[in-house]
Structures are given as C-alpha cells and as structure tokens.
Amino acid sequence: MDWKKSIYSDGSHHFVTPARPSLGEKIRIRLQMIVNDQVVGAQCRLSKNGEEHIEEMSISVVGDLIVFECETTMNQPKLNYHFIVFTDKEVLFYNQYGTTEVIPTEDYDFKLMADYQ
C-alpha cells in the first residue's frame, strides 16, 4: 500500500480528545499513517483568532502505524486545522479533502466547535 493513501485523521474521539471540547479546554489532535521510511515529521496548522498558528507534532510508533500528536487550547468558538507532513523530498498537506502537494485553503480544514451539544 502507498503510505500516502494511509494518511488519516477525523473529528472522532480517536483523533481529537476530547471530541467535544469546551471553550478554554486543552485538546489533543492526532494524525496517523502506516509506518514508512520517508516521513520525517508533521505539523498541525491551526487558524487561531484569524492568524496562522503552527503546532509541532510529537511522533510515536504504535504497531504498524506512525501516530503524530499535538496539544493546543480551544481558545475560540470554532477552530480550523489541517496537517503538514514532511518527507526528505516533499511537503504534503492533509485536510478533509485528502492529501495534496498544494497549499490548501481553509475550505476543507477540519473544524472543531467549542461546547457543541
């Protein structure tokens, strides 16, 4: 399997903890893919208060998966984010639309809503 096709995240409790954050609460955001020898790191690009904010993601290997994780604070009612994946040869972007080599707009960013019922 092409490791690029295995890149995955969503808004469920498996990838966002807590899945329904309150305003001001700390959250953890995860991204995963199959183990490969090309990926060297990842970042989470968030839109906070109208400005770009980059969070470095820690890396761990769980079985045959590489799991990236970062922590941030739900400091506004709606938080948009997508991922940036680095290899030794290219930079990839991952959002709800999928994986691309082109810097995405925020149209397909993942979105978290504070105090969502």
Image (cartoon, rainbow, N blue to C red):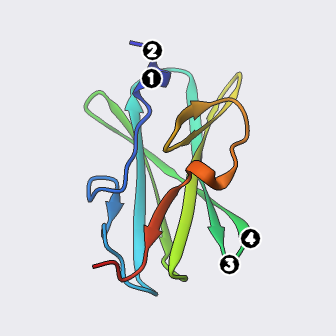
Distance in Å between CA atoms under marks 3 and 4 = 6 Å
Which label's residue is closer to the chain start, 4 or 2? 2
Distance in Å between CA atoms under marks 1 and 2 = 6 Å
Disc 3 + disc 4, Cβ < 8 Å: yes
Q: Which one is nearer the viewer's eye here, 115 or 13?
A: 115
**Quarter of the figure with the N terminus:** top left
Disc 3 + disc 2, Cβ < 8 Å: no
Say which of marks 3 and 2 sits in front: 3
Residue that mark 4 sits on: 51
> Which amino acid type is marked by label 2?
Asp
Point 41% across, 52% down: residue: 30
Residue that mark 3 sits on: 49
Residue that mark 2 sits on: 2
How far across and down, in percent of the image, does residue 4 sit? 50, 23
Which label's residue is closer to the chain start, 4 or 1? 1
Disc 1 + disc 2, Cβ < 8 Å: yes
Point 34% across, 53% down: residue: 15
